[in-house]
Amino acid sequence: MTDTVTETATEHLSTAPSVSAPTGRRRPLLRAWRQLTSMRTALLLLSLLALAAIPGTLIPQRGLNPVKVAQFYSDHPTLAPAFDKLSLFDVFAAPWFAAIYLLLFVSLIGCLVPRIRLHARALRRTPPAAPRHLLRLSTSSDWTDPRSATDVIGAATAALKSARWRTDVRTEPDGAVSVAAEKGYLRETGNLVFHVALLLLLTGIALGGLFGYKGTVLVPEGSGFANVQSSYDVFSPSRLFHDTKLPPFSFTLDKFTATYQDNGQPKSFAAHVTYQPTPGATGRPFDISPNNPLSIGGSDVYLVGHGYALHLQVRDPKGRLVYDKSTPFLPDDAMFTSHGVVKVPDGLPHQLGLTGFFYPTYGPSPLGAQSTFPGAKDPVLDLAAWQGDLGLSSGRPQSVYTLPVAQLRNIGTTQLAPGKTWRMKDGTTVTFVSVQQWATFQVAHDPGTTIVLVAAGFIVAGLLCSLRVRRRRLWVRARPAADGRVGAATVVEAGGLARSDADGFTAEFDRLVNRLKD
């Protein structure tokens, strides 16, 4: 708590009537409430909230990138289920995160309400009267002035008001006239604005958590997306969200472009889409990039990932087409070595499964094949064929990116380039038609975004005020000259105090004194 509020609270307590302490069951409840609404507890909860958010930045989040979450499960099959039980893949919707959030919200309200009341009372008070011995203050000065005491104090008051000091003129019992001035209440105002804006920020975030939604979808080139819940790969609605609130927009991924530096580091990404804000509306082109989302219907469409989709065709021994799709392959490393699965349950004498590793720029190494560049300069597909029951009719959920190879029989492997065909022993053919790309989009609706933006601006403004403004007080007293003083009508004394930055206040005090002398 700042010096202003501490001083005000002290004066208030010294003049307030005594109130009997609560007894019985109320005593522990009041003690708990005071502990919760103390500034120390608020700071502790704020630090705890920051620590609780760290896993959300280090561990892939299901609402942001389900592909990375699936990859984490694949890489850490023992650790991932434990993380999931602790809600570490969805940190910001976890019950323990919400509990910290709610406690911080209550603590801030309970702490701010009395502080605002005390600060408002302090703003209405007049500056305190001048101390009896001004020259004993560390920052002080005295001089004589030919004008009367009333004229001197009038000039001092005008000078202080022009410098935006709060003033109060008093006539003392011994006939002296003094002016009390103070400045720097904006420091505590900024402090309160900062905390109120922080509370407003939490409110905006809470609104997004209650009425917003997030969803991710993987869209290959040439495919489209309609904003209905069934179209999402992962959909995370808020507690009070309803499907009827989804805006009816749609878009088609016309083309995805990615550029890289010579060492393989990414340079730029862009998803070229055509979108319709409502069904039947004229399509409009738009380029979605990492820092340029598509805003439509109160929602934002972000580009969050990309990879390669391979166009494969499978024909039966008689040449009839039984599979013709672009299959997304998931990247395994920074050079976009990718893996994928094709399942052909119908159209052949037996169910067929294909597992493949795709190398955008093929390069052999002592450890095996690898991709040496993320761009598709020399694409190669290593393909393995499996025959048997794919388990699709068992009724159990199954990932489209996995194949139960332990239950299947391998019937061959090959390596294909775009345009090449693999003919198996039974006459079934697999053609690697072309290389396409896919993009992962996150669609998010957050009704608290504007509130958060406004609150962030007030947080910065309040923080600047609380850090740069100094509390200080200054007094000027003028009294008629004592007997024996010739040529002087009035003796003037000035003194001041500062809460901080004594050197800066000394320079300010000297400037004011010189102005009064002139």
Image (tube, rainbow, N blue to C red):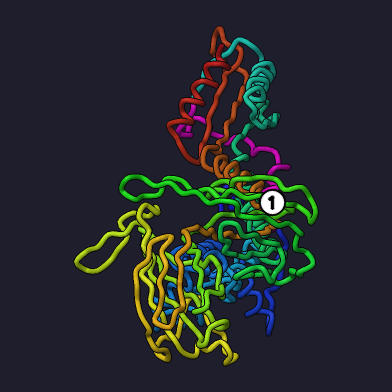
Other residues around mark 1 within 10 Å, as few (<14) / some (14–19) / many (≥20): many
- Residue 418 percent coordinates (x, y): 42, 60
* Foreground of the two, 395 or 157: 395
* Residue type indicated by callout 1: Tyr
Residue that appears at 64% across and 39% down: 128
Mark yes or no: residue 293 visible: yes
- Depicted 72 relative to depicted 398: above or below: above
The question of residue 125 being in magenta is answered with: yes
**Left or right: 418 as drawn, with respect to 4:** left
The segment highlighted magenta reads 113-140
Residue that appears at 40% across and 78% down: 424
According to the picture, the residue beneath numbered tag 1 turns out to be 275
> Does dot 1 land on a helix, a strand or a loop?
strand
* Quarter of the image where the N terminus is located: bottom right
**Left or right: 172 as drawn, with respect to 356:** right
- Depicted 435 relative to depicted 150: above or below: below
- Residue 18 percent coordinates (x, y): 70, 66
Mark yes or no: residue 188 visible: no
Residue that appears at 51% across and 37% down: 498
- Residue 134 percent coordinates (x, y): 53, 31
* Foreground of the two, 421 or 392: 421
Residue farthest along the top direction in this orientation: 487
